[in-house]
Image (cartoon, grey):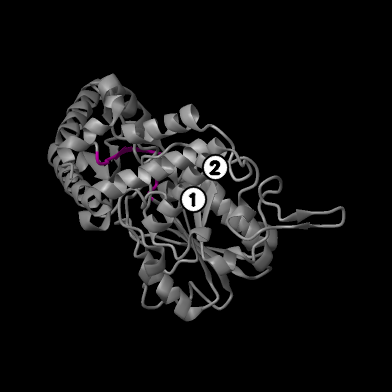
Amino acid sequence: MKLPADWKNDFPVFANNPRLIYLDSAATALKPRSVIDKITEYYAKYPANIHRGIYRISEKATEEYEESRIAVKKFINASRFEEIIFTRNTTESVNLIAYSLGRQMVGPDDEIVTTVMEHHSNFVPWQVLAHETGAIFKVVDINNDGCLDVNISNLAGIITKRTKILALAYVSNVLGTVNPVKEIIRAAKKINPKIITVVDAAQAIPHIPVDVRDLDCDFLAFSGHKMLGPTGIGVLYGKYNLLNNMFPFNFGGGMIKEVTIEKTEFPPPPARFEAGTPAIAEVIGLGEAVKYLQAIGIKNVSQYENELTSVAVKYLTAAFGDNIRILGPKDVGKRVGVIAFTFKNYHPHDIAQILDEDDICIRAGHHCAMPVHKRYGLTASARMSLYLYNDYKDIEKVIAGLKKAEKILK
């Protein structure tokens, strides 16, 4: 098995950009050579459409496409491959649930519950659904340490018999907080066994083991590009009995059982939700990304990242003390390597721009999570996000870059 010191060599971007310090994996992760080669393989060797061709290269493309579905199924421990729906991204996955199921089951005075730490993709669709249907939109707050301000053993008052949907992030893309999703779902279903639980796993899937059967969530969504796969491909996991009773989100080719002048009949999942020509190369690339992470071991990634995060928090605090404010849990065991921070009164955009002069890539802004920034009284933050191709030298260079920014901006 490759050691952490060797992982970085698998990513061609570093050979092409030797000075690059990439610390924006929470936005999109870099791609290993195996994923890039797999996408090229599709376009070079069997660049045909899938499912309908009876010639060899079409059958090969179909085989590779469906093998990726099985790889994802195993990666998240779904019960069956039909529970894996390919979408464009996490955003489309969540919107699919909101349109195909939410609008069927939510009515006036029903409740939808989410949290203040959500990415807009798992906040706005539910807020809009509540406004359209007359439902009550509840938002769970966090404490100052960046953890949900809720007593899991007693969710009464938050979850009720009228709560139809509970939508929450497994990991915050700003705070790095790993939420106790399994325990929350279990407690919520004790109060209301009919509640539908939706987990945004976009920031969890690259960093920690995700087991949908252990979580017992009804739906779970994530994006390929955050887990070393291509952009433009996402996944929606859903329990089969729910998917099989949902109305399609898009209509067109590929999701048809029979069309007559009088009516149209739709096939069972997953075809029901995959209208039109899909992102074939991207799905195949995602399958290869899954294989890459499985070969390393997601637990090994998690352990290495946890050690790196602990060092980063320690070094940043030692270097700048109270002048740097790190958002999220102080206990590194409760977070992943997503480190959003403010530095004195310097604007995050200025910090990011100065770091870029030394080829250090961080993110600056509200990170598509305005409610949690407002919760902290902020309009923006700087964010460095660590992943398996980062090392301790990267952290040292960030600290040197921040000292440079301090001299320029003071």
Query: What element does badge 1 sit on?
Result: strand
Q: In which quarter of the image is residue 171?
A: bottom left
> Measuring 61% from the left and 42% from the top, which residue is drawn there?
54
Query: Chief secondary structure of the magenta span?
Result: loop
State the mark number for residue 151.
Answer: none
Seen from the viewer's position, the closer of residues 10 and 362 is 10
Left or right: 72 with respect to 314? right
Give residue 1's position: percent from left, percent from top.
18, 45
Left or right: 404 with respect to 281? left
Q: In which quarter of the image is residue 321?
A: top left
Quarter of the C terminus within the rendering: top left
Residue corresponding to mark 2: 59
Which comes before the other along the chain, label 2 or label 1?
Answer: 2
Q: Can residue 66 be seen in this view?
A: yes
Seen from the viewer's position, the closer of residues 140 and 90 is 90
Seen from the viewer's position, the closer of residues 5 and 104 is 5
Q: Does the magenta stretch include residue 381?
A: yes
Q: Does the magenta stretch include residue 145?
A: no
